[in-house]
């Protein structure tokens, strides 16, 4: 993480699978905070209540995955009895001065549950994030225009965040290999649990470079240079709209993508930090050597087949 910070990374995103399965997660977060990263964790809440105290003060952007406004539908989508865990985790987080956003990955199946989840978020003064489910292979959008329209209309309500650039990207048919938008390699450093740099992105990692204590060297390696020259141009990149990589990509894209993304993020920041008066993440003071990149540390668990679900 020290080398990642020196290379210009600003965000450390501990994701999965389920990051709370790792017993040393609090140690990793503390190290990241000490180095000046803004930290983020996305969890399914199955283990959160028991571990909330360990995470206090260590997570700047905490996301709780919630798929419905009822145990019946949430548990059907997720399996097991997890809805009540999410509800209990909200109280456990607030008791430890952690302020989660509720992350609602919308699909055809749960789109009508938005309102109920929004009411829950409003009641607790939490941000509701609407994230369109994405396909990890092939460019076909798994969500109908009608459902996107519903989400877009709902995003105008108070306390709701939807990065509208995601919808613009889908309208345009996703990434095009002839004129690529994707900046997965230049914007993000993805490290797998076996300490390898995944290239060009986690979901289509066709090259994995062992780090062996020299991330700085790996970031200058021939393999990464090659991946940089091909980002968004691989055959599997046609139509791609994987939210995790396009979110940091929009800062490079300029034009409407940049404007829509910045506008959405400003709205999030104003609501969360000014209206809801939640504590602003403390940024490190170390001057980055290049444009800010997130470092994504993938934890235990398998690659989600669709959408960012934890
Ligand atoms: S376009 Fe998609 S598949 Fe291709 S490198 Fe970017 S994120 Fe990965």
Image (spheres, rainbow, N blue to C red):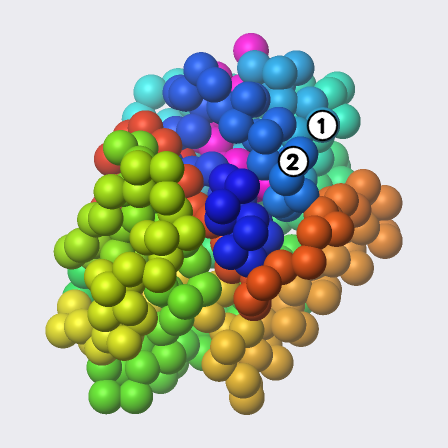
**Horizontal relation, residue 116 to residue 232: left or right:** right
Please state the extent of the stretch shown in magenta in the rendering.
39-50
User: Picture quarter containing residue 144?
Assistant: bottom left
Which is more N-terminal, label 2 or label 1? 2
Which residue is label 1 attached to?
A: 57
- Residue 77 is tagged as none
Ligand 1 within 8 Å of disc 2? The answer is: no
Residue 42 within the segment the image draws in magenta:
yes
Q: Residues within 10 Å of mark 2 (few under 14, many from 20)?
A: many
In the rendered image, residue 80, in percent from the top left (x then y), is placed at 33, 20
User: Picture quarter containing residue 255?
Assistant: bottom right
Judged from the image, the secondary structure of the residue bearing numbered disc 1 is loop
C-alpha gap between disc 1 and disc 2: 9 Å
- In the rendered image, is residue 150 in sight? no
Relative vertical location of residue 203 with respect to residue 226 in this rendering, above or below:
above
In the rendered image, residue 111, in percent from the top left (x then y), is placed at 44, 53
**Horizontal relation, residue 106 to residue 61: left or right:** left
Relative vertical location of residue 200 with respect to residue 110 in this rendering, above or below:
below
Judged from the image, the secondary structure of the residue bearing numbered disc 2 is helix
Q: Are marks 1 and 2 in contact (CB under 8 Å)?
A: yes
Name the residue rendered at 56%, 15% in the picture.
Answer: 51
Q: Nearer the viewer, residue 277 or 116?
A: 277
Name the residue rendered at 53%, 36% in the picture.
Answer: 41
Residue 54 within the segment the image draws in magenta:
no
Relative vertical location of residue 309 with respect to residue 193 in this rendering, above or below:
below
Q: Nearer the viewer, residue 40 or 230?
A: 230
- Residue 33 is tagged as 2
Name the residue rendered at 81%, 41% in the picture.
Answer: 279
**Horizontal relation, residue 123 to residue 32: left or right:** right
In the rendered image, residue 28, in percent from the top left (x then y), is placed at 52, 28
Name the residue rendered at 36%, 73% in the picture.
Answer: 182
């Amino acid at each position: 993480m020290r080398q990642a910070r020196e290379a210009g990374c600003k965000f450390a995103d501990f994701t999965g699978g389920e990051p709370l399965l790792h017993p040393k997660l609090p140690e990793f977060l503390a190290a990241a905070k000490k180095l000046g990263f803004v930290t983020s964790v996305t969890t399914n809440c199955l283990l959160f209540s028991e571990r909330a105290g360990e995470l206090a003060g260590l997570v700047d952007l905490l996301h709780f995955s919630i798929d419905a406004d009822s145990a019946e539908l949430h548990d059907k989508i997720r399996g097991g009895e997890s809805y009540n865990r999410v509800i209990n985790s909200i109280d456990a987080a607030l008791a430890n001065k952690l302020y989660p956003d509720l992350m609602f990955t919308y699909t055809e199946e749960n789109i009508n549950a938005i309102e109920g989840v929004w009411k829950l978020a409003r009641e607790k003064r939490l941000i509701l994030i609407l994230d369109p489910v994405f396909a990890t292979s092939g460019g076909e959008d798994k969500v109908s225009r009608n459902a996107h329209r519903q989400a877009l209309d709902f995003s105008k309500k108070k306390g709701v965040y939807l990065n509208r650039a995601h919808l613009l990207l889908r309208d345009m048919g996703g990434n095009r290999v002839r004129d690529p938008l994707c900046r997965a390699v230049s914007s993000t450093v993805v490290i797998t649990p076996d300490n390898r740099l995944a290239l060009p992105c986690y979901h289509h990692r066709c090259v994995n470079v062992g780090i062996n204590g020299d991330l700085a060297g790996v970031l200058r390696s021939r393999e990464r240079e090659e991946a940089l020259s091909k980002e968004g141009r691989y055959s599997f990149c046609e139509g791609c709209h994987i939210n995790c990589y396009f979110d940091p990509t929009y800062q490079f894209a300029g034009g409407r993508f940049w404007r829509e993304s910045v506008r959405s993020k400003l709205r999030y920041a104003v609501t969360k930090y000014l209206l809801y008066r939640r504590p602003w993440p403390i940024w490190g003071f170390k001057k980055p050597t290049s444009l800010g990149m997130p470092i994504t540390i993938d934890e235990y668990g398998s690659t989600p087949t669709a959408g960012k679900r934890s």
